[in-house]
Amino acid sequence: MEQSVDVCIIGGGAAGLFCAFHAARKGLSVIVLEHTDSIGKKIRISGGGRCNFTNYTVKPEHYISENPHFHKSALARYTSHDFISLVQSHHIPFHEKTLGQLFCDNSSKDIIAMLLHECSTVGVEIQTGVSISSIEKNEYFHIHTHTRDIISRTVVIACGGTAIPAMGASDFGLRIARQFGLKIVAPYPALVPLLWRPEDKHWSELAGLSVYVETSASSAHFKENMLFTHKGLSGPAILQISSYCKGKHPFFVNLSPNHDLAESLFNPQHRDQSLSTVLSFILPQRLAKNICALNNYQKPLKQYSKNEIEHIISQLMHWEITPNGTEGFAKAEVMGGGVSTDELSSKTMESKKVKGLYFIGEVVDVTGWLGGYNFQWAWSSAYAASKALV
């Protein structure tokens, strides 16, 4: 049994569904093939079930790629405000959290329902539980599934990356890219908790403690909460910096980004107090006591020299941490790396080597920061591809 279509989209997530209804609006016949039993699984769990669907401020520097210019075109042609307008047209209530992050008031299911409604109004066919055995190309693409063969003039790979395999994530998109001779930037877990080295595991005593910090690596800086865990470090500030240190390179933590430590530690009124007591005015008490115990800082402040206090301030503002890896793709928000942008048109997302083959969303080597940026890349890259499908 065969079925012929204009566009076959592999992957029923954010990018795939978004591309599908935009392509179908042009009068194209579109089928979406999803290998799991339901569409939009990662949308459903995102943002704690409320879907951080975009950000008020989206700039190219909010993304990591071997080509820092590749994503500029797509992001400019379909902006976060364009997607916000779509959400508003469906009367979906939403709110802003910190740093421009936008979440549904009710549930991420509202975004899924919106995408499905848009698909249904233009006749997009969606098939779930579809196992694809192979994709071949002669004059047209032949997609072989366990139930039928689909012949399509174009194929859009929108099946995401390898992050969160429990939700059905796989390397299928990367395998297809390799099959057709496209270069891959080595995948890595991004936006992921980091692990302690054996010599640093004493910090696990602070598991459950959250502190507002600034993390930094290279030119990247993030002011958000950091969470101590039994295994290592997590929280938004750590997830953000993990995409830069990749679980192996050193990064820095400023434990008091919004407080003048010198003003407190050199304050004459604090001279007779212990360092632990003074630090407890600035840091969580558990953290202050742990730092002082580890470094044997037990004396009153007046017994420390100016150089010693300056050294302590430097320690607290430039805590250097070298992680012992990450918690892996199982805990990563997204996959970093992917299909090399050298292989794709930045305007259309089409393969330069294989006419009619497109890659969009997470499978491409464009990784956003935490805060709605990866969803915006899904919408923008999908829109770019849909405009090129004819």
Image: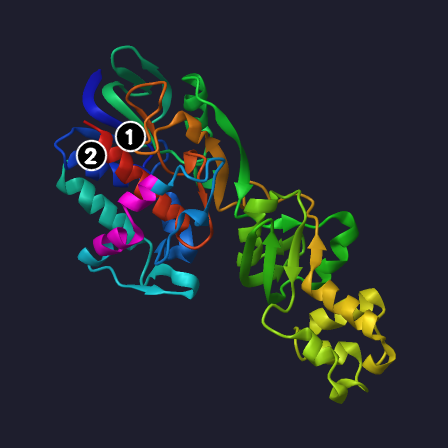
Vertical arrangement, residue 20 with respect to residue 101, above or below: above
Horizontal side of residue 287 vs 193, given as left or right: right
The disc label shown at residue 161, or none: none
Percent position of residue 382, x then y: 30, 38
Residue at the spot 38% in from the left edge and 40% down from the top edge? 71
Give yes or no for contact between labels 2 and 1 (Cβ–Cβ under 8 Å): yes
Answer with the quarter of the image where residue 158 lies.
top left
Percent position of residue 347, x then y: 30, 34
Helix or strand or loop: what does disc 1 sit on? strand
Quadrant the C terminus occupies: top left
Q: Which residue lies under the disc numbered 2?
A: 23
Answer with the quarter of the image where residue 344 lies.
top left
Q: Does residue 286 show up magenta in the picture?
A: no
| Crowd rating for badge 2 (residues with CA inside 10 Å; few <14, some 14–19, many 20+) | many
Closest to the camera, between mark 2 and mark 1, is 2
Task: In the displayed orientation, state which residue is furthest to the top.
Answer: 138
**Numbered circles on residues, count:** 2
Quadrant the N terminus occupies: top left
Q: Give the range drawn in magenta.
A: 73-86
Earlier sequence position, callout 2 versus callout 1: 1
Answer with the quarter of the image where residue 11 lies.
top left
Q: Which residue lies under the disc numbered 1?
A: 9
Vertical arrangement, residue 208 with respect to residue 182, above or below: below
Residue at the spot 35% in from the left edge and 60% down from the top edge? 103
Q: Main secondary structure of the magenta part?
A: helix
Q: Can residue 39 be seen in this view?
A: no
| Crowd rating for badge 1 (residues with CA inside 10 Å; few <14, some 14–19, many 20+) | many
Q: Does residue 84 show up magenta in the picture?
A: yes
Percent position of residue 34, x then y: 33, 33
Give the CA distance from mark 2 to mark 1. 10 Å
